[in-house]
Image: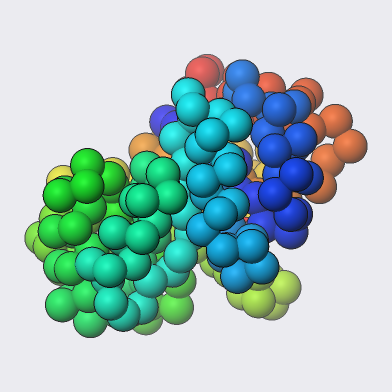
Amino acid sequence: MELQLALDLVNIPEGIALVKEVEPFIDIVEIGTPIVINEGLHAVKAMKEAFPNLKVLADLKIMDAGGYEIMKASEAGADIITVLGASNDLTIKGCVDEAKKQGRKVLVDMINVQDIATRAKELDELGVDYICVHTGYDGQAAGQSPFTDLATIKSVVKNAKTAVAGGIKLATMPEVIQANPDLVIVGGGITSQDDKAATASQFRELIAQA
Ligand SMILES: O=C(CO)[C@H](O)[C@H](O)COP(=O)(O)O
């Protein structure tokens, strides 16, 4: 299981300083959607230049013009780029084809998809690299969590890697480990802690013990 640190509520220098603290414990650093909105793809480029040994995920949450947006994120150095599961199949295919051409990976964010099982099967057949169940901030605030959806995709996805995001904390890692996704994405569970390195190290230990 890989560990991805999601950066959302920081600017580029703050993000780089934060990753310096936790670099030994993470596999992937995510440039979250709010950072892309605030800073553009420069944030992806700056993070890749600062940490060439980490994979960088650009959380673009693509909804249209998939091929073009994958191309631009690839130029900035993104290793993995996100597209919304609710997008048209043509958009998903555009993402998959361009990512293959560029040697990048596509992660589908299933946020707000109603029929998770059916859509996950379709996306798996379209050749995406990761399928990620995700309870967004608004859902989290309403008390929702992604674990039922995680069990659903684990039962239907055959080729893609599975991932989970949305309010994951050390306390909820046992539920993650039980479901055994290929990737766990943690934002506030690390970034809002006083000792970020110690917390990231504990996430890493739990994953190693799984
Ligand atoms: O994509 C996101 C919000 O749309 C976040 O990056 C994702 O939810 C992980 O952050 P957190 O662990 O704080 O929920």
Q: Quadrant of the N terminus?
A: top left
Residue at the extreme left of the image, as rendered: 125
- Residue occupying the point 34% across, 51% down: 74
Say if 48 sits above or below 36 in the image.
above
> What percent of the width, then of the height, locates residue 194?
89, 37
Say if 159 sits above or below 204 in the image.
below
- Residue occupying the point 67% across, 57% down: 8
**Residue 189 seen in this snapshot:** no
What color scheme is it?
rainbow
Relative to residue 54, is residue 103 drawn left or right? Answer: left
- Residue occupying the point 48% across, 24% down: 53
The picture quadrant where one finds residue 106 is bottom left
The picture quadrant where one finds residue 153 is bottom left
Who is closer to the viewer here, 42 or 96?
Answer: 42
Say if 9 sits above or below 115 in the image.
above
Total marks in image: 0
Who is closer to the viewer here, 208 or 74?
Answer: 74
The picture quadrant where one finds residue 125 is bottom left
Who is closer to the viewer here, 205 or 93?
Answer: 93
